[in-house]
Amino acid sequence: MTDKTDIILIINGRAHAISVEPRKTLVDAIRDDCGQTGTHIGCEHGICGTCTIILDGDAVRSCLMFAVQADGRHIRTVEGLADGETLHPLQQAFITHHGLQCGFCTPGFLMLAVNALEHNPNIGDDELLDVLASNLCRCTGYQNIIKAVRAARDEMRGAKAT
Amino acid sequence: MARPVPESPEPMKPAAFRYYTPKTLAEAVAVLADVASDDGRILAGGQSLVPIMAFRLAKPTHLVDINGISELARVTVADGKLKIGACVRHAAFYQPVCDGPLGKLLATVVRSIAHHPIRTRGTFCGSVAHADPASEWCALVAMLDGEMVAQSKRGQRVIAAKDYFAGIMTTALDEDELLTEVRLPLLPADARVGFQEFSRRAGDFALGMAVVTYQVVGGKIATARVGIGGAEPSPRRIAEAEAALIGKPPGATAFDAAAVAAAAAIAPLEDFHTSADYRRDLVRAMTRRALDSAAV
Ligand SMILES: Cc1cc2nc3c(=O)[nH]c(=O)nc-3n(C[C@H](O)[C@H](O)[C@H](O)COP(=O)(O)OP(=O)(O)OC[C@H]3O[C@@H](n4cnc5c(N)ncnc54)[C@H](O)[C@@H]3O)c2cc1C
Ligand code: FES
Ligand code: FES
Protein backbone atom coordinates (compact mmCIF):
# COMPACT_ATOMS: atom_id res chain seq x y z
CA MET A 1 0.00 0.00 0.00
CA THR A 2 2.87 2.34 0.74
CA ASP A 3 4.54 1.32 -2.50
CA LYS A 4 6.45 4.16 -4.04
CA THR A 5 6.14 5.27 -7.63
CA ASP A 6 8.98 6.67 -9.72
CA ILE A 7 8.10 10.02 -11.24
CA ILE A 8 9.81 12.99 -12.83
CA LEU A 9 8.94 16.55 -11.87
CA ILE A 10 10.28 19.20 -14.21
CA ILE A 11 10.77 22.22 -11.97
CA ASN A 12 11.93 25.46 -13.58
CA GLY A 13 13.26 23.47 -16.51
CA ARG A 14 15.24 20.95 -14.47
CA ALA A 15 14.12 17.32 -14.23
CA HIS A 16 13.94 15.79 -10.75
CA ALA A 17 13.63 11.99 -10.72
CA ILE A 18 12.02 11.05 -7.41
CA SER A 19 10.20 8.15 -5.80
CA VAL A 20 7.02 8.98 -3.86
CA GLU A 21 4.00 7.39 -2.25
CA PRO A 22 0.77 8.30 -4.12
CA ARG A 23 -0.49 10.12 -1.03
CA LYS A 24 2.36 12.63 -1.05
CA THR A 25 1.09 16.06 -2.05
CA LEU A 26 2.84 17.95 -4.82
CA VAL A 27 4.02 20.69 -2.47
CA ASP A 28 5.64 18.15 -0.13
CA ALA A 29 7.41 16.51 -3.07
CA ILE A 30 8.64 19.85 -4.41
CA ARG A 31 10.04 20.80 -1.00
CA ASP A 32 11.15 17.54 0.59
CA ASP A 33 12.09 15.38 -2.39
CA CYS A 34 13.30 18.05 -4.82
CA GLY A 35 14.73 20.44 -2.21
CA GLN A 36 12.99 23.45 -3.72
CA THR A 37 11.84 25.08 -0.50
CA GLY A 38 10.87 28.44 -2.01
CA THR A 39 7.28 27.23 -2.26
CA HIS A 40 5.73 27.48 1.19
CA ILE A 41 3.12 25.38 2.99
CA GLY A 42 0.49 27.09 5.08
CA CYS A 43 -2.90 25.56 5.62
CA GLU A 44 -2.52 22.37 3.55
CA HIS A 45 -6.20 22.42 2.64
CA GLY A 46 -6.56 24.94 -0.14
CA ILE A 47 -7.43 28.08 1.82
CA CYS A 48 -4.30 30.23 1.99
CA GLY A 49 -2.65 29.97 -1.43
CA THR A 50 0.93 30.16 -0.14
CA CYS A 51 1.67 26.91 -2.02
CA THR A 52 0.61 28.38 -5.41
CA ILE A 53 2.75 27.21 -8.32
CA ILE A 54 2.34 27.29 -12.10
CA LEU A 55 1.63 23.86 -13.61
CA ASP A 56 1.79 23.69 -17.41
CA GLY A 57 0.84 27.37 -17.58
CA ASP A 58 -1.93 27.43 -14.95
CA ALA A 59 -1.78 28.65 -11.35
CA VAL A 60 -2.72 25.80 -9.00
CA ARG A 61 -2.65 25.08 -5.26
CA SER A 62 0.13 22.50 -4.96
CA CYS A 63 -1.25 21.19 -1.64
CA LEU A 64 -4.41 20.05 -3.48
CA MET A 65 -2.65 17.77 -5.96
CA PHE A 66 -0.75 14.57 -5.48
CA ALA A 67 2.82 14.54 -6.78
CA VAL A 68 2.08 11.48 -8.94
CA GLN A 69 -0.44 13.62 -10.84
CA ALA A 70 2.34 15.96 -11.95
CA ASP A 71 4.58 13.22 -13.39
CA GLY A 72 6.36 14.57 -16.48
CA ARG A 73 4.74 17.99 -16.24
CA HIS A 74 6.29 21.44 -16.19
CA ILE A 75 6.24 23.27 -12.89
CA ARG A 76 7.32 26.83 -12.22
CA THR A 77 8.12 27.98 -8.70
CA VAL A 78 9.47 31.18 -7.17
CA GLU A 79 13.07 29.94 -7.65
CA GLY A 80 12.58 30.29 -11.40
CA LEU A 81 11.51 33.94 -11.47
CA ALA A 82 14.84 35.76 -11.26
CA ASP A 83 17.22 35.76 -14.21
CA GLY A 84 20.54 35.13 -12.46
CA GLU A 85 21.15 38.16 -10.23
CA THR A 86 18.39 40.17 -11.91
CA LEU A 87 15.08 39.97 -10.11
CA HIS A 88 11.84 39.54 -12.04
CA PRO A 89 10.06 42.92 -12.41
CA LEU A 90 7.35 41.68 -10.03
CA GLN A 91 9.89 40.69 -7.37
CA GLN A 92 11.51 44.13 -7.71
CA ALA A 93 8.08 45.80 -7.45
CA PHE A 94 7.34 43.88 -4.22
CA ILE A 95 10.54 45.36 -2.74
CA THR A 96 9.90 48.88 -4.03
CA HIS A 97 6.28 48.98 -2.83
CA HIS A 98 6.79 47.05 0.42
CA GLY A 99 4.58 44.18 -0.80
CA LEU A 100 5.92 41.92 1.94
CA GLN A 101 6.74 41.95 5.62
CA CYS A 102 7.46 38.46 6.97
CA GLY A 103 7.52 37.08 3.43
CA PHE A 104 5.70 33.85 4.19
CA CYS A 105 2.92 34.43 1.67
CA THR A 106 5.18 36.03 -0.93
CA PRO A 107 6.12 33.01 -3.09
CA GLY A 108 2.44 32.18 -3.52
CA PHE A 109 1.47 35.77 -4.34
CA LEU A 110 4.33 36.08 -6.83
CA MET A 111 3.38 32.93 -8.75
CA LEU A 112 -0.32 33.84 -8.65
CA ALA A 113 0.32 37.35 -9.99
CA VAL A 114 2.98 36.36 -12.54
CA ASN A 115 0.55 33.85 -14.00
CA ALA A 116 -2.25 36.43 -14.18
CA LEU A 117 0.02 39.01 -15.85
CA GLU A 118 1.37 36.46 -18.34
CA HIS A 119 -2.14 35.37 -19.30
CA ASN A 120 -3.38 38.93 -19.68
CA PRO A 121 -0.74 41.71 -19.71
CA ASN A 122 -3.59 44.26 -19.91
CA ILE A 123 -5.50 42.87 -16.93
CA GLY A 124 -7.73 45.56 -15.42
CA ASP A 125 -7.55 46.71 -11.79
CA ASP A 126 -10.83 45.03 -10.84
CA GLU A 127 -9.93 41.69 -12.34
CA LEU A 128 -6.51 41.88 -10.72
CA LEU A 129 -8.15 42.47 -7.36
CA ASP A 130 -10.34 39.42 -7.93
CA VAL A 131 -7.29 37.26 -8.70
CA LEU A 132 -5.29 38.57 -5.73
CA ALA A 133 -8.23 37.75 -3.42
CA SER A 134 -7.26 34.09 -3.94
CA ASN A 135 -4.42 34.22 -1.42
CA LEU A 136 -4.06 35.23 2.23
CA CYS A 137 -1.49 37.55 3.77
CA ARG A 138 -1.39 38.09 7.52
CA CYS A 139 1.00 41.06 7.51
CA THR A 140 0.60 43.64 4.79
CA GLY A 141 -3.11 44.38 4.75
CA TYR A 142 -2.90 43.70 0.99
CA GLN A 143 -2.72 47.33 -0.18
CA ASN A 144 1.01 47.21 -0.89
CA ILE A 145 0.69 43.85 -2.64
CA ILE A 146 -1.94 45.35 -4.91
CA LYS A 147 0.26 48.41 -5.53
CA ALA A 148 3.25 46.24 -6.35
CA VAL A 149 1.38 44.06 -8.83
CA ARG A 150 -0.19 47.07 -10.56
CA ALA A 151 3.23 48.71 -10.84
CA ALA A 152 4.76 45.53 -12.28
CA ARG A 153 1.90 45.23 -14.75
CA ASP A 154 2.43 48.79 -15.95
CA GLU A 155 6.19 48.30 -16.16
CA MET A 156 5.99 44.97 -17.98
CA ARG A 157 3.46 46.43 -20.40
CA GLY A 158 5.73 49.43 -21.03
CA ALA A 159 8.69 47.12 -21.66
CA LYS A 160 6.63 45.18 -24.22
CA ALA A 161 5.48 48.33 -26.02
CA THR A 162 9.01 49.71 -26.60
CA MET B 1 10.41 25.60 34.12
CA ALA B 2 9.78 24.23 30.67
CA ARG B 3 6.20 24.46 29.47
CA PRO B 4 4.58 21.09 28.80
CA VAL B 5 4.78 20.22 25.15
CA PRO B 6 1.28 19.78 23.73
CA GLU B 7 0.64 16.40 22.17
CA SER B 8 1.07 16.77 18.44
CA PRO B 9 -2.20 16.44 16.57
CA GLU B 10 -2.62 14.07 13.65
CA PRO B 11 -0.52 15.37 10.78
CA MET B 12 -2.27 17.21 7.93
CA LYS B 13 -1.35 14.41 5.56
CA PRO B 14 -3.70 12.14 3.63
CA ALA B 15 -3.77 8.47 4.61
CA ALA B 16 -2.29 5.95 2.19
CA PHE B 17 -4.31 4.76 -0.81
CA ARG B 18 -3.83 2.71 -3.92
CA TYR B 19 -3.75 4.89 -7.04
CA TYR B 20 -5.19 4.05 -10.48
CA THR B 21 -4.90 6.01 -13.73
CA PRO B 22 -7.36 4.62 -16.25
CA LYS B 23 -7.05 6.01 -19.78
CA THR B 24 -10.61 5.21 -20.92
CA LEU B 25 -14.07 5.42 -19.39
CA ALA B 26 -14.51 1.66 -19.76
CA GLU B 27 -11.31 1.06 -17.81
CA ALA B 28 -12.36 3.55 -15.11
CA VAL B 29 -15.75 1.96 -14.42
CA ALA B 30 -14.15 -1.51 -14.43
CA VAL B 31 -11.68 -0.44 -11.72
CA LEU B 32 -14.43 1.37 -9.81
CA ALA B 33 -16.58 -1.78 -9.88
CA ASP B 34 -13.72 -3.66 -8.21
CA VAL B 35 -12.79 -1.10 -5.56
CA ALA B 36 -15.98 0.89 -4.78
CA SER B 37 -17.14 -1.43 -1.99
CA ASP B 38 -13.69 -1.12 -0.36
CA ASP B 39 -13.96 2.70 -0.10
CA GLY B 40 -12.65 3.33 -3.58
CA ARG B 41 -13.44 6.75 -5.02
CA ILE B 42 -13.07 8.93 -8.05
CA LEU B 43 -10.42 11.66 -7.98
CA ALA B 44 -11.42 14.49 -10.32
CA GLY B 45 -10.12 18.02 -9.64
CA GLY B 46 -9.33 17.09 -6.05
CA GLN B 47 -10.36 20.54 -4.82
CA SER B 48 -12.92 19.12 -2.38
CA LEU B 49 -11.58 15.60 -1.89
CA VAL B 50 -7.93 16.42 -1.12
CA PRO B 51 -8.78 18.92 1.69
CA ILE B 52 -11.09 16.33 3.26
CA MET B 53 -8.32 13.75 2.99
CA ALA B 54 -5.80 16.14 4.53
CA PHE B 55 -8.06 16.40 7.59
CA ARG B 56 -8.49 12.60 7.41
CA LEU B 57 -12.24 13.08 7.35
CA ALA B 58 -12.00 10.77 4.33
CA LYS B 59 -9.48 7.94 4.08
CA PRO B 60 -10.29 6.30 0.78
CA THR B 61 -8.45 3.02 0.26
CA HIS B 62 -8.36 3.41 -3.53
CA LEU B 63 -8.39 6.51 -5.73
CA VAL B 64 -9.37 6.26 -9.39
CA ASP B 65 -7.89 9.35 -11.06
CA ILE B 66 -9.99 10.28 -14.11
CA ASN B 67 -7.84 13.24 -15.22
CA GLY B 68 -6.16 11.20 -17.96
CA ILE B 69 -9.41 10.22 -19.71
CA SER B 70 -9.49 12.57 -22.70
CA GLU B 71 -12.96 11.46 -23.85
CA LEU B 72 -14.36 13.05 -20.65
CA ALA B 73 -12.72 16.45 -21.19
CA ARG B 74 -15.23 17.70 -23.77
CA VAL B 75 -18.05 20.24 -23.85
CA THR B 76 -20.45 19.57 -26.73
CA VAL B 77 -23.80 20.86 -27.94
CA ALA B 78 -26.27 18.31 -29.33
CA ASP B 79 -30.04 17.77 -29.33
CA GLY B 80 -30.67 21.22 -27.82
CA LYS B 81 -28.47 20.38 -24.84
CA LEU B 82 -25.10 21.42 -23.53
CA LYS B 83 -23.16 18.30 -22.51
CA ILE B 84 -20.40 18.82 -19.97
CA GLY B 85 -17.94 15.93 -19.56
CA ALA B 86 -16.53 14.80 -16.21
CA CYS B 87 -13.07 16.33 -16.75
CA VAL B 88 -14.23 19.81 -17.80
CA ARG B 89 -12.78 22.26 -15.30
CA HIS B 90 -14.47 25.34 -13.82
CA ALA B 91 -12.08 27.64 -15.73
CA ALA B 92 -13.43 26.32 -19.05
CA PHE B 93 -16.54 28.47 -18.48
CA TYR B 94 -14.78 31.86 -18.22
CA GLN B 95 -15.62 32.40 -21.90
CA PRO B 96 -19.13 31.36 -22.99
CA VAL B 97 -18.99 27.67 -24.01
CA CYS B 98 -22.14 27.98 -26.13
CA ASP B 99 -24.11 30.70 -27.89
CA GLY B 100 -27.00 32.44 -26.20
CA PRO B 101 -28.01 33.09 -22.60
CA LEU B 102 -26.78 29.75 -21.19
CA GLY B 103 -23.13 30.41 -22.11
CA LYS B 104 -23.42 33.89 -20.62
CA LEU B 105 -25.01 32.59 -17.41
CA LEU B 106 -22.29 29.93 -16.93
CA ALA B 107 -19.62 32.61 -17.45
CA THR B 108 -21.24 34.78 -14.77
CA VAL B 109 -21.72 32.00 -12.24
CA VAL B 110 -18.16 30.60 -12.51
CA ARG B 111 -16.77 33.90 -11.16
CA SER B 112 -18.33 33.12 -7.78
CA ILE B 113 -16.84 29.63 -7.40
CA ALA B 114 -13.80 29.60 -5.13
CA HIS B 115 -10.71 31.34 -6.60
CA HIS B 116 -8.87 31.20 -9.89
CA PRO B 117 -6.19 28.61 -8.84
CA ILE B 118 -9.00 26.31 -7.65
CA ARG B 119 -11.00 26.83 -10.84
CA THR B 120 -8.04 25.64 -12.93
CA ARG B 121 -8.36 22.16 -11.35
CA GLY B 122 -11.89 21.71 -9.97
CA THR B 123 -14.47 20.23 -12.33
CA PHE B 124 -18.13 20.97 -13.05
CA CYS B 125 -19.11 17.32 -12.62
CA GLY B 126 -16.97 17.01 -9.47
CA SER B 127 -19.04 19.80 -7.91
CA VAL B 128 -22.26 18.06 -8.94
CA ALA B 129 -20.99 14.72 -7.56
CA HIS B 130 -19.81 16.33 -4.31
CA ALA B 131 -23.16 18.15 -3.90
CA ASP B 132 -22.19 20.77 -1.36
CA PRO B 133 -25.42 22.63 -0.49
CA ALA B 134 -23.69 25.89 -1.50
CA SER B 135 -22.38 24.67 -4.85
CA GLU B 136 -23.19 27.23 -7.56
CA TRP B 137 -23.18 24.56 -10.29
CA CYS B 138 -25.63 22.42 -8.31
CA ALA B 139 -28.02 25.37 -7.97
CA LEU B 140 -27.79 25.97 -11.71
CA VAL B 141 -28.41 22.28 -12.50
CA ALA B 142 -31.46 22.25 -10.21
CA MET B 143 -32.84 25.48 -11.69
CA LEU B 144 -32.52 24.19 -15.27
CA ASP B 145 -33.68 20.62 -14.51
CA GLY B 146 -30.37 19.29 -15.80
CA GLU B 147 -29.67 15.60 -16.30
CA MET B 148 -26.90 13.55 -14.78
CA VAL B 149 -25.46 10.67 -16.82
CA ALA B 150 -24.21 7.90 -14.51
CA GLN B 151 -22.09 5.06 -15.87
CA SER B 152 -21.10 1.87 -14.13
CA LYS B 153 -20.04 -1.56 -15.29
CA ARG B 154 -23.73 -2.47 -14.89
CA GLY B 155 -24.82 0.10 -17.47
CA GLN B 156 -25.81 3.72 -17.96
CA ARG B 157 -28.69 5.71 -16.54
CA VAL B 158 -29.82 9.30 -16.80
CA ILE B 159 -30.96 10.93 -13.55
CA ALA B 160 -33.18 14.03 -13.49
CA ALA B 161 -32.13 16.83 -11.13
CA LYS B 162 -35.26 16.47 -8.99
CA ASP B 163 -34.35 12.81 -8.35
CA TYR B 164 -30.62 13.45 -8.02
CA PHE B 165 -29.99 15.82 -5.10
CA ALA B 166 -30.68 13.97 -1.86
CA GLY B 167 -29.36 16.21 0.92
CA ILE B 168 -26.09 17.63 2.17
CA MET B 169 -23.31 16.05 0.05
CA THR B 170 -25.70 13.26 -0.86
CA THR B 171 -26.85 12.28 -4.34
CA ALA B 172 -28.59 9.45 -6.17
CA LEU B 173 -25.23 8.21 -7.53
CA ASP B 174 -24.33 4.67 -6.47
CA GLU B 175 -20.81 4.10 -5.17
CA ASP B 176 -19.74 2.26 -8.35
CA GLU B 177 -21.17 4.95 -10.65
CA LEU B 178 -19.12 7.57 -12.42
CA LEU B 179 -20.87 10.80 -13.34
CA THR B 180 -19.70 11.00 -16.95
CA GLU B 181 -21.66 14.01 -18.09
CA VAL B 182 -24.10 16.68 -16.99
CA ARG B 183 -26.62 17.90 -19.60
CA LEU B 184 -28.21 21.33 -19.47
CA PRO B 185 -30.98 22.51 -21.80
CA LEU B 186 -29.89 25.37 -24.05
CA LEU B 187 -31.85 28.55 -23.31
CA PRO B 188 -33.78 30.36 -26.05
CA ALA B 189 -32.21 33.57 -27.36
CA ASP B 190 -34.81 35.76 -25.61
CA ALA B 191 -34.36 34.13 -22.18
CA ARG B 192 -33.19 36.56 -19.53
CA VAL B 193 -30.78 35.18 -16.93
CA GLY B 194 -29.60 36.36 -13.53
CA PHE B 195 -27.48 35.14 -10.61
CA GLN B 196 -26.69 36.56 -7.18
CA GLU B 197 -25.07 35.12 -4.08
CA PHE B 198 -23.86 36.30 -0.73
CA SER B 199 -20.72 35.05 1.01
CA ARG B 200 -18.79 36.53 3.89
CA ARG B 201 -15.55 36.84 1.89
CA ALA B 202 -14.80 36.65 -1.83
CA GLY B 203 -14.43 33.00 -2.83
CA ASP B 204 -16.01 31.52 0.31
CA PHE B 205 -18.94 29.16 0.07
CA ALA B 206 -22.09 31.28 -0.15
CA LEU B 207 -24.71 31.50 2.60
CA GLY B 208 -27.43 31.78 0.00
CA MET B 209 -27.86 32.24 -3.75
CA ALA B 210 -30.51 32.64 -6.42
CA VAL B 211 -30.23 31.79 -10.09
CA VAL B 212 -33.13 32.69 -12.38
CA THR B 213 -34.31 32.76 -15.96
CA TYR B 214 -37.52 34.00 -17.54
CA GLN B 215 -39.01 34.96 -20.88
CA VAL B 216 -41.24 37.93 -21.54
CA VAL B 217 -43.97 37.71 -24.18
CA GLY B 218 -46.21 40.69 -24.91
CA GLY B 219 -44.95 42.57 -21.86
CA LYS B 220 -45.71 39.71 -19.43
CA ILE B 221 -43.54 36.98 -17.97
CA ALA B 222 -44.43 33.82 -19.88
CA THR B 223 -41.96 31.26 -18.46
CA ALA B 224 -39.93 31.43 -15.25
CA ARG B 225 -37.46 29.34 -13.31
CA VAL B 226 -36.18 30.30 -9.86
CA GLY B 227 -33.43 28.16 -8.29
CA ILE B 228 -32.25 28.60 -4.71
CA GLY B 229 -28.95 27.20 -3.41
CA GLY B 230 -26.98 27.36 -0.17
CA ALA B 231 -30.05 27.83 2.00
CA GLU B 232 -31.40 24.28 2.24
CA PRO B 233 -29.66 20.87 2.28
CA SER B 234 -30.08 20.66 -1.51
CA PRO B 235 -30.68 23.28 -4.18
CA ARG B 236 -34.09 23.27 -5.90
CA ARG B 237 -36.59 25.19 -7.99
CA ILE B 238 -39.10 27.14 -5.96
CA ALA B 239 -42.53 26.71 -7.59
CA GLU B 240 -44.13 29.39 -5.38
CA ALA B 241 -41.68 32.03 -6.58
CA GLU B 242 -42.13 31.02 -10.22
CA ALA B 243 -45.94 31.20 -9.88
CA ALA B 244 -45.63 34.74 -8.51
CA LEU B 245 -43.91 35.81 -11.74
CA ILE B 246 -46.02 34.15 -14.43
CA GLY B 247 -48.42 36.51 -16.20
CA LYS B 248 -47.00 39.63 -14.51
CA PRO B 249 -45.06 42.42 -16.18
CA PRO B 250 -41.35 42.18 -15.23
CA GLY B 251 -40.62 44.79 -12.60
CA ALA B 252 -40.47 45.62 -8.92
CA THR B 253 -43.96 44.40 -7.98
CA ALA B 254 -43.61 40.94 -9.50
CA PHE B 255 -39.97 40.57 -8.41
CA ASP B 256 -40.79 41.50 -4.80
CA ALA B 257 -43.67 39.05 -4.73
CA ALA B 258 -41.45 36.26 -6.07
CA ALA B 259 -38.68 37.08 -3.59
CA VAL B 260 -41.07 37.02 -0.65
CA ALA B 261 -42.57 33.75 -1.92
CA ALA B 262 -39.09 32.15 -2.19
CA ALA B 263 -38.21 33.22 1.35
CA ALA B 264 -41.45 31.78 2.70
CA ALA B 265 -41.12 28.49 0.81
CA ILE B 266 -37.72 27.36 2.08
CA ALA B 267 -36.79 25.41 5.19
CA PRO B 268 -33.46 27.15 5.90
CA LEU B 269 -30.32 25.50 7.22
CA GLU B 270 -29.04 27.00 10.44
CA ASP B 271 -25.41 27.17 11.49
CA PHE B 272 -23.16 29.33 13.62
CA HIS B 273 -23.13 32.04 10.95
CA THR B 274 -26.84 32.32 10.44
CA SER B 275 -30.25 31.83 11.96
CA ALA B 276 -33.19 30.58 9.89
CA ASP B 277 -34.65 34.09 9.80
CA TYR B 278 -31.42 35.56 8.52
CA ARG B 279 -31.18 32.98 5.75
CA ARG B 280 -34.77 33.57 4.74
CA ASP B 281 -34.11 37.27 4.42
CA LEU B 282 -30.94 36.54 2.48
CA VAL B 283 -32.87 34.34 0.04
CA ARG B 284 -35.42 37.12 -0.37
CA ALA B 285 -32.68 39.64 -1.14
CA MET B 286 -30.76 37.32 -3.49
CA THR B 287 -33.92 36.38 -5.41
CA ARG B 288 -34.87 40.02 -5.81
CA ARG B 289 -31.38 40.97 -7.01
CA ALA B 290 -31.09 37.98 -9.36
CA LEU B 291 -34.41 38.94 -10.98
CA ASP B 292 -33.26 42.56 -11.22
CA SER B 293 -29.93 41.56 -12.79
CA ALA B 294 -31.78 39.42 -15.35
CA ALA B 295 -33.95 42.38 -16.35
CA VAL B 296 -31.05 44.46 -17.66
C1 LIG C 1 -10.76 27.25 -0.76
C2 LIG C 1 -11.85 26.58 -1.55
C3 LIG C 1 -13.01 27.29 -1.84
C4 LIG C 1 -14.04 26.70 -2.56
N1 LIG C 1 -15.16 27.44 -2.82
C5 LIG C 1 -16.16 26.87 -3.54
C6 LIG C 1 -17.34 27.62 -3.84
O1 LIG C 1 -17.47 28.80 -3.51
N2 LIG C 1 -18.33 27.00 -4.53
C7 LIG C 1 -18.20 25.69 -4.95
O2 LIG C 1 -19.12 25.18 -5.58
N3 LIG C 1 -17.10 24.98 -4.70
C8 LIG C 1 -16.07 25.53 -4.01
N4 LIG C 1 -14.95 24.78 -3.76
C9 LIG C 1 -14.91 23.37 -4.21
C10 LIG C 1 -14.51 23.23 -5.65
O3 LIG C 1 -15.46 23.84 -6.51
C11 LIG C 1 -14.36 21.76 -6.08
O4 LIG C 1 -13.68 21.81 -7.32
C12 LIG C 1 -15.63 20.97 -6.28
O5 LIG C 1 -16.45 21.00 -5.15
C13 LIG C 1 -15.33 19.47 -6.51
O6 LIG C 1 -14.86 19.26 -7.80
P1 LIG C 1 -13.50 18.46 -8.02
O7 LIG C 1 -13.41 18.19 -9.48
O8 LIG C 1 -12.39 19.21 -7.41
O9 LIG C 1 -13.81 17.07 -7.29
P2 LIG C 1 -12.96 16.17 -6.29
O10 LIG C 1 -12.47 16.97 -5.15
O11 LIG C 1 -11.96 15.39 -7.07
O12 LIG C 1 -14.10 15.16 -5.82
C14 LIG C 1 -15.13 15.54 -4.92
C15 LIG C 1 -16.02 14.33 -4.63
O13 LIG C 1 -16.79 13.98 -5.76
C16 LIG C 1 -16.47 12.68 -6.25
N5 LIG C 1 -16.41 12.78 -7.70
C17 LIG C 1 -15.74 13.73 -8.42
N6 LIG C 1 -15.97 13.58 -9.74
C18 LIG C 1 -16.81 12.53 -9.87
C19 LIG C 1 -17.44 11.89 -10.98
N7 LIG C 1 -17.24 12.33 -12.23
N8 LIG C 1 -18.25 10.83 -10.75
C20 LIG C 1 -18.47 10.39 -9.49
N9 LIG C 1 -17.91 10.95 -8.40
C21 LIG C 1 -17.10 12.01 -8.58
C22 LIG C 1 -15.15 12.32 -5.60
O14 LIG C 1 -15.02 10.93 -5.43
C23 LIG C 1 -15.25 13.06 -4.28
O15 LIG C 1 -15.99 12.33 -3.35
C24 LIG C 1 -13.89 25.36 -3.04
C25 LIG C 1 -12.71 24.65 -2.79
C26 LIG C 1 -11.70 25.24 -2.05
C27 LIG C 1 -10.44 24.46 -1.78
S1 FES D 1 -0.95 25.41 1.76
FE1 FES D 1 -1.97 25.14 -0.13
S2 FES D 1 -3.55 26.59 -0.01
FE2 FES D 1 -2.68 26.73 1.97
S1 FES E 1 4.02 39.14 4.35
FE1 FES E 1 3.65 37.98 6.13
S2 FES E 1 1.96 36.75 5.52
FE2 FES E 1 2.16 38.10 3.87
Image (cartoon, coloured by chain):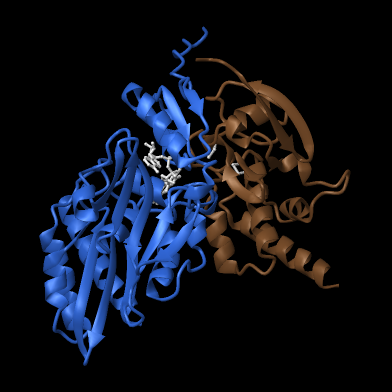
Chain colours: A brown, B blue
Vertical placement of residue A118 versus B51, above or below? below
Vertical placement of residue B128 versus A39, above or below? below
Q: Residue at x 70, y 33 (%)?
A: A9
Q: Residue at x 18, y 70 (%)?
A: B259
Judged from this view, the residue extending furthest toward the right is A85
Closer to the camera in the image, A134 or B108: B108
Q: Residue at x 51, y 34 (%)?
A: B22
Judged from this view, the residue extending furthest toward the top is B1
Residue B175 pos. (x, y %): 30, 33
Looking at the image, how many numbered discs can be counted on the residues? 0
Judge left or right: residue B180 versus residue A110: left
Residue B274 pos. (x, y %): 23, 49
Closer to the camera in the image, B233 or A49: B233
Judged from this view, the residue extending furthest toward the bottom is B218
- Is residue B29 something one can see in this rendering? yes
Judge left or right: residue B191 versus residue A138: left
- Is residue B52 something one can see in this rendering? no
Residue A123 pos. (x, y %): 63, 67
Residue B156, quarter of the rendered image: top left
Judge left or right: residue B82 versus residue A33: left
Residue B215, quarter of the rendered image: bottom left
On-image quarter of the C terminus of chain A? bottom right
Q: Residue at x 55, y 48 (%)?
A: A135
Judge left or right: residue B183 versus residue A36: left
Q: Tell which quarter ligand 3 is in.
A: top right
Residue A74 pos. (x, y %): 70, 42
